[in-house]
Amino acid sequence: MITALAGGVGAARFLRGLVAVVPPERTTAIVNTGDDLVLHGLYICPDLDTVTYTLAGVIDPATGWGRAEESWRVMDQLGRLGGRTWFRLGDMDLATHLYRTQRLSEGVGLSVVASELAAAWELDVRMLPMSDDPVRTVLRVPGQGEVSFQDYFVRQHHDVTVESVSFAGVEDAAPAPGVLDAVAAADAIIICPSNPIVSIGPIVAVPGMRQALESRRERVVAISPIIAGAAVKGPADRLMRELGHDASVVGVARLYGALAGTLVIDRADEDLAGAVEAQGIRVVITETLMSTPAVAADLARAALASVLG
Ligand code: FO1
């Protein structure tokens, strides 16, 4: 069994490669829910949906989130009414949020809804939210105080300085059913190329997760989302710098060193391999920029080989 810790777009692209090289029914994705939000009364789980739509082959390839061939009639009407439209919800995507919100109101847990949605897309991958309990990533921005994740990421285009990041509610959150077992029983645990602070950080912060990963460290392989000092997409590099980390594969190694025995880095960072290994973490060097599904599959193969031999 293979278990992957996943954020949004980068993780989804990696997982598409992973299921090309291992049977999907042997694969579990533990997905960040710190980005979740309630908007228009709807419960929205961007990372779960991004991973689900990508594996189902219906993701918008241009944005990496939302549905391909989407229409926006509801958003257009909402705009006319003066409603909130900064977080774009397409007409087909809205069906997912309506379904999820209704099921949650019936008392069903988020993990059950996630598996129902995965089944509706005929996915064999086990899709688990990190927790059924609400955890919200919150960023402290000078002059604004605490800002919710999607306000920071989408409304403010992650173009503000961040002083600190916290995960509201995480102390009281329990891992979703099956999460700890998926770590304990996995032959390999892969930390996907996601933002270490705001995508993987919330998953690791769920009580019990850090210890579960540390105890399987030799089976944990992380893929650096930083290539040549920059994030492929999103604010990981800037956020790392602002929070006092090196925005490099060495900084990633320091963040993951206690959890992962191996770090996969890009060929562009070959000259930093020694500095990474000095952090007590083995290095695998390969192409990590997932420009095509075939590159993602090769990356998955390399990550698995580093742990499974
Ligand atoms: N990202 C944007 O940049 N702008 C949006 O309007 C937006 C809407 C949206 C709706 C549903 C969904 O599942 C994702 C959406 N995203 C949007 C992406 C999302 O903010 C990020 O991908 C993640 O939260 C970061 O991993």
Image: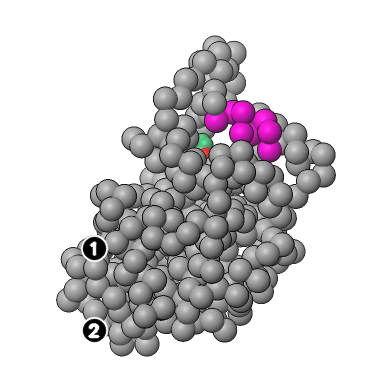
Look at the image and give the residue range highlighted in magenta: 93-100
- Residue 85, how many percent across, how many down? 53, 25
- Residue 256, how many percent across, how many down? 44, 75
Q: Taking 117 as reference, is 89 above or below it?
A: above
Q: In the drawing, what numbered circle is on residue 232?
A: none
Disc 1: which residue: 287
- Residue at horizontal 33%, vertical 58%? 297
- Residue at horizontal 39%, vertical 60%? 21
Circle 2 sits in a helix, a strand or a loop, which is it? helix
The colouring scheme, among rainbow, by chain, secondary structure or one colour, is one colour
Residue 282 vs residue 87, the one in the foreground: 282
Magenta: main secondary structure: helix
Separation of marks 2 and 1 at Cα, in angstroms? 18 Å
Q: Taking 275 as reference, is 63 above or below it?
A: above
Residue 38 vs residue 66, the one in the foreground: 66
Residue 164 visible in this rendered orientation of the protein: no
Residue 299 visible in this rendered orientation of the protein: yes
Disc 2: which residue: 274
- Whether the residue under disc 2 has CB within 8 Å of ligand 1: no
Query: Label 2 sits on what residue type?
Result: Gly
Badge 2 or badge 1: first in the primary sequence: 2
